Image (cartoon, helix red, strand yellow):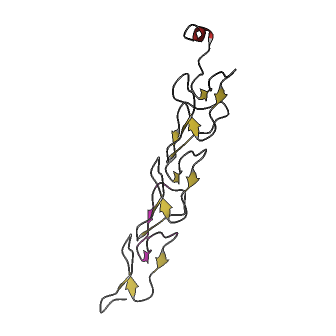
Amino acid sequence: SGAASVNCTACGLGTYSGAGASSCDACENGTYAAVLSSASCSECASGKYSRSRTGQASCDDCAAGRSSGSRASKCTDCEVGKWSDTGAVVCESCVGGRFSLGGTANCTACAEGKYSGAGASACSGCEAGKHAGPASSACEKCESGTF
């Protein structure tokens, strides 16, 4: 069979074929073939995706503010109150004193006089008689002689 393979054509990057195939097939969305003559495609790892009609030789990282599970054809925006770095598997909740409108690479600090708990979509103003510095997770009582 070694002599017969001289007339066989190798499948290109991003494509595969089984034994005896008459052509190569493109890897499906969420998969890739990184080497020539692939017999199958590999799944994209979590935090990566592939989307191509002609097959892909590799998977791309999800952009910051997005995430994906394995074999993804697209990445999903982080939910409100969450953020992510590039190539994230899951989005992380904002810590107290910060908020996110979703799909962001970081959380925004609450302004002075406002606060938020973890995973917040907005900051709330302190009630009368209380105050908060920038990026606060709670308001504190004003000291005697102040309001």
Q: Residue at x 62, y 13 (%)?
A: 8
Span highlighted in magenta in the image: 104-121
Name the spot of residue 59 as percent of width and height, x first. Answer: 53, 37
> Can you say whether 69 is above or below 54 in the image?
below
- Toward the front, the furthest residue is 1
Vertical order, 102 against 85 (above or below): below
Along the line of sight, the residue nearer the viewer: 141 or 29: 29
140 sits to left or right of 127? left
The residue closer to the viewer here, 24 or 107, is 24
Report which quarter residue 31 is drawn in. Answer: top right
Relative height, residue 103 to residue 147 (above, below): above
Residue 132 pos. (x, y %): 38, 78
Q: Which residue is depicted at the point 51% across and 29% down?
A: 34
Could you tell me which quadrant the C terminus lies in?
bottom left
In the rendered image, residue 112 lying in the magenta stretch gets the answer yes
Between 110 and 75, the one nearer to me in the picture = 75
